[in-house]
């Protein structure tokens, strides 16, 4: 089973300091059209990120300004 911390680690590349519960993102994957889930987490003391991950393919994104 995927935990909030492991989901955040999949998107971020490293384990976060803290993570909120996983939720449905209420939109479909732009690559395959399947369900997307989201998790909010803190990669550092001063940053909060919401990450999105498709449940069926490798697509992932976050809400950081690029």
Image (spheres, grey):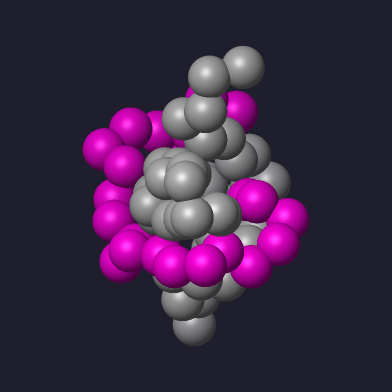
Location of residue 51 with respect to 15 vertically, above or below: above
Location of residue 54 with respect to 65 vertically, above or below: below
1 vs 6, nearest the viewer: 6
Total tally of numbered discs in the picture: 0
Q: Residue at x 61, y 17 (%)?
A: 66
The picture quadrant where one finds residue 25 is: top left
Q: Residue at x 48, y 55 (%)?
A: 45
Q: Pinpoint residue 59: horizontal percent, then vertical percent.
A: 63, 39
Q: Residue furthest right?
A: 13
Is 38 inside the magenta-drawn segment? no
Q: Pinpoint residue 49: horizontal percent, then vertical percent.
A: 45, 43
Q: Residue furthest bottom?
A: 1
30 vs 65, nearest the viewer: 65
Q: Residue at x 65, y 59 (%)?
A: 10
Q: Is residue 37 visible?
A: no
The picture quadrant where one finds residue 61 is: top right
Q: Pinpoint residue 39: horizontal percent, then vertical percent.
A: 40, 54
Is 32 inside the magenta-drawn segment? yes
Location of residue 44 with respect to 17 vertically, above or below: above
Residue range corresponding to the magenta coloring: 11-35
Q: Is residue 19 visible?
A: yes
Q: Pinpoint residue 33: horizontal percent, then vertical percent.
A: 48, 33
* 61 to the left or right of 58: left
């Amino acid at each position: 089973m995927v935990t909030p911390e492991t989901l955040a680690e999949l998107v971020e590349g490293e384990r976060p300091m803290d993570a909120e519960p996983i939720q449905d993102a209420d939109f479909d994957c732009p690559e395959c059209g399947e369900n997307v889930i989201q998790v909010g987490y803190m990669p550092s003391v001063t940053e909060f990120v919401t990450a999105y991950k498709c449940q069926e393919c490798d697509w992932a994104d976050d809400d950081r300004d690029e």
